[in-house]
Image (spheres, grey):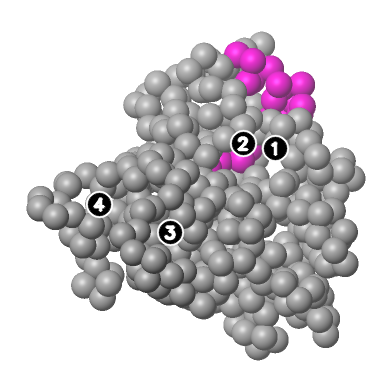
Amino acid sequence: MIVEKKLGKSTQAIHAGESHLSALEKSGIPLLPPIYQNSTFRFTTAAECAEAFRDEESGYVYTRWGNPTQDVLEKKLAVLEAGEAALATASGMGAVSTALLTALADGGHVVAMANLYSATFQILNEDLRQFGIETTFVDVTDLTQIERAIKMDTKVLYLESPTNPLLKLIDLRGAAEVAKAHGLISIIDNTFATPCGQQPINFGIDVVVHSMTKYLSGTGAVIAGAVIGEKEFVTRVKKGALRNFGAVISPFNAWLTLQGITTLPIRFARHCENAGQVAEFLEAHPAVAWVRYPGLQSHPQYELARRQMEAFGGMITFELKGGRTAGEHLVDRLERCALAVSLGDVRTLICHPASTTHSHVPSEIRQQIGITDGLVRISVGLEDIEDILSDLKQALESCAS
């Protein structure tokens, strides 16, 4: 593990976590990690089976408890995110929910940022309230608001950076210091940035969650999630909420995600390169009211982005001067950029958050946190930049006509 952490990200993405396969094979080691597409595992003696139940690290028992394909993926994730351990889940929300349920096993209070992915907002604002767990939503770009929101029973500080969809940034080191000073578990969704853009654990954040459906798998063919952090916490998630609530990744999806991660560093670099050019194009276009992208000097937190991000990502948020009507007209006129709600795909995807990803967030809350009805979010893909720009140009011209 120590040797792997000294390697470059592309080398880690290809090789990390695969060394233990030699213990599973009698002769040649497969170059590509195989799919162990089985639900259970056979033992030769009763004593051997009993030992596996006593000490799960001595062998595999049942795929809901663990699987060799999943193990390779988790070892790779831990190395990439600089964590002690990782756990793959059936979806990004499987990662978010099991991490929260574990951190809040004895109840308590949560401080969370006001601008969150809509399903995460629903868990905190609705689902956990049914169990007596309250959440205070604040603008965590102001660390003093975190301090003021903390109560005697606060257990968790929940973050995203960059946020979905407004691309606000959190001072990771500052937020982590506040959490540690008050004995809170800090959890961050790092889906937008990926470990190629930032490694929150290196700034003091306790737990990182991902929707691996997005950049980590990269092709739009997988639903998967991940929890990364200290081994003790990850083990509690695995043996408790994940295993018992059943948000377990399938061996096939674990294998598909492994294939995607091997190309993550080179893909993410292209996403960032293309997004930077798209952001500059949009900012200069007369039909666009404003653009948010961490790599633009006009971003209010540009200096923070430069300090804590290695790369600025592939996500852009913007608004047309014509508001919702112009935004809907834009997405209707695009030919190559796909109207779809996900992100991190090799394809360029565009969506209207107020009517899709954040439609379940009450209108007054959307307006309060800045998700206006005319907001447009674009996940810049890997197509040739000239083709992306020409598609956006013709659609924007039709909006102005």
Query: Which element type, helix, strand or loop, lies under badge 3?
Result: loop
Q: Upstream in the sequence, badge 3 or badge 4? A: 4
Which is in the foreground here, disc 1 or disc 4? Answer: 4
Q: Please say if 129 is above or below 120.
A: below
Q: Which residue is mark 4?
A: 14
Query: Which element type, helix, strand or loop, lies under badge 4?
Result: helix
**In front of the other: 129 or 113:** 129
Which is in the foreground here, disc 3 or disc 1? Answer: 3
Which is in the foreground here, disc 2 or disc 3? Answer: 3
Q: Could you classify mark 4 by the number of other residues whose Cα lies within 10 Å: few (under 14), some (14-19), or many (20 or more)?
A: some
Q: Where is residue 99, by image quadrant? A: bottom right
Q: Could you classify mark 1 by the number of other residues whose Cα lies within 10 Å: few (under 14), some (14-19), or many (20 or more)?
A: some
Q: Upstream in the sequence, badge 2 or badge 3? A: 3
Give the CA separation, mark 2 to mark 3. Answer: 44 Å
Q: Residue 210: x and y, percent?
A: 53, 54
Residue 315 is covered by the magenta coloring: yes
Q: Which residue is mark 3?
A: 61
Q: Which residue is mark 2?
A: 377
Q: Where is residue 282, by image quadrant? A: top right
Q: Upstream in the sequence, badge 3 or badge 1? A: 3
Q: Upstream in the sequence, badge 1 or badge 4? A: 4
**What label does residue 296 carry, if any?**
none
Q: Residue 392: x and y, percent?
A: 52, 22
Q: Which residue is mark 1?
A: 357
Name the amino acid, label 1: Thr
Tags 1 and 2 touching, CB below 8 Å: yes
* Residue at the farthest left position: 27
Left or right: residue 177 versus residue 347 is right
Give me the residue at 67% from left, 85% from top: 183
* Residue at the farthest front position: 46
**In front of the other: 100 or 300:** 100
